[in-house]
Amino acid sequence: MKRVLIAGCGYVGSALAARLAADGFEVWGMRRSPDGLPAGVRPLAADLRDPATLAGLPAGLATVFYTAAADGGAEDEYRAAYVDGPRNLLAALAAQGQRPRRVIFTSSTSVYSQSGGEWVDEDSRAEPAGFRGRMMLEGESIVLGGPFPGVVLRLGGIYGPGRTSYIDRVRSGAAECPAITTYTNRIHRDDCAGALRHLMHLPSPHPVYLGVDRAPADSCDVLHWLAAALGKPAPLRAEEAVRPRSNKRCRSDRLASSGYTFLYPTYREGFAALL
């Protein structure tokens, strides 16, 4: 039975772990407090920020997923999660003589700073404007330049069970459309897990994939669709135009052409499943 490690086994990692355990893999879920992992997943208590806790990794790991998230929004927390963490884990794997065939790292579309509604794909310029994107890009470089074959999945805004902010805002009447057209890119949690599982099995993957659904959408269109589905008044447009920090349309053509079929190809299917 092939062994898989999911480092930072949280919201996305747990969904992935459950799927791989059901597939018959021996799955280890690593986090500081590994209580509450899905059934069939072996717990591993370790702190990716502390190399000393990584000395006892399971032997013979075939695939390693790095799905950790920052503890908060500060720069040092992002550096700990997306720079120090992958560096520490790769060093521990190498020191223990591990030879995983692939290390898969979840990054973010925040590595792109385009803000004029441009279309973006894996070949687009990645010059992040803020520290979050810079830390992500540095983590990507660590994994792709590390001692093991690496793959990066740049995820858009993750939603799903327990992450329903758009729905909650519309339901409460607090939603407001931006004054100018603002594109958003999202992916359902189950498609995050599905895409990671898919990349694990690809024989010759590209180094980088965009993990977003098949329909980047104007945020106002999404809010109006939700209002109609919930039987609520359509949100009004804000009077003051504020230039958004992010306004781009991300393509997932590379992921789709590699053979991945989305469970929720647009926000309509994804949100309908949550309502």
Image (cartoon, rainbow, N blue to C red):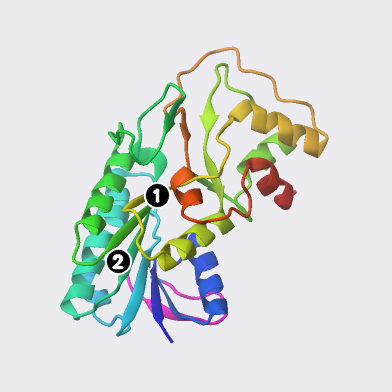
Q: Is residue 31 above or below residue 109?
A: below
Mark in the foreground, 1 or 2: 1
Question: Relative to the observer, which residue lies in front, 17 or 194?
Answer: 194
Residue 133 in magenta stretch: no
Q: What is the x, y in percent for residue 266?
A: 63, 42
Question: Which quadrant is home to the N terminus?
Answer: bottom left
> In the image, what residue type sits under mark 2?
Leu
User: Which SS type dominates the magenta stretch?
Assistant: loop
Question: Relative to the observer, which residue lies in front, 85 or 268?
Answer: 268
> In the image, what residue type sits under mark 1?
Tyr
Q: Can residue 58 be seen in this view?
A: yes
**Residue 162 lies in quadrant:** bottom right
Q: What is the x, y in percent for residue 112?
A: 35, 35
Residue 43 in magenta stretch: yes
Q: What residue is pinned by disc 2? A: 48
Check residue 209 in the rendering and tell me which mark sits there, or answer none.
Answer: 1
Say few, some or many: other residues with alpha carbon within 10 Å of mark 1 (under 14 / 14 to 19 / 20 or more): many
Question: Relative to the observer, which residue lies in front, 14 or 147?
Answer: 147
Say few, some or many: other residues with alpha carbon within 10 Å of mark 2 (under 14 / 14 to 19 / 20 or more): many
Q: Helix, strand, or loop for circle 1? A: strand
Left/right placement of residue 182 relative to residue 175 reads left
Q: Which residue shows up at 33% across the image and 44% down it? A: 74
Check residue 252 in the rendering and tell me which mark sits there, or answer none.
Answer: none
Question: Relative to the observer, which residue lies in front, 75 or 257?
Answer: 257
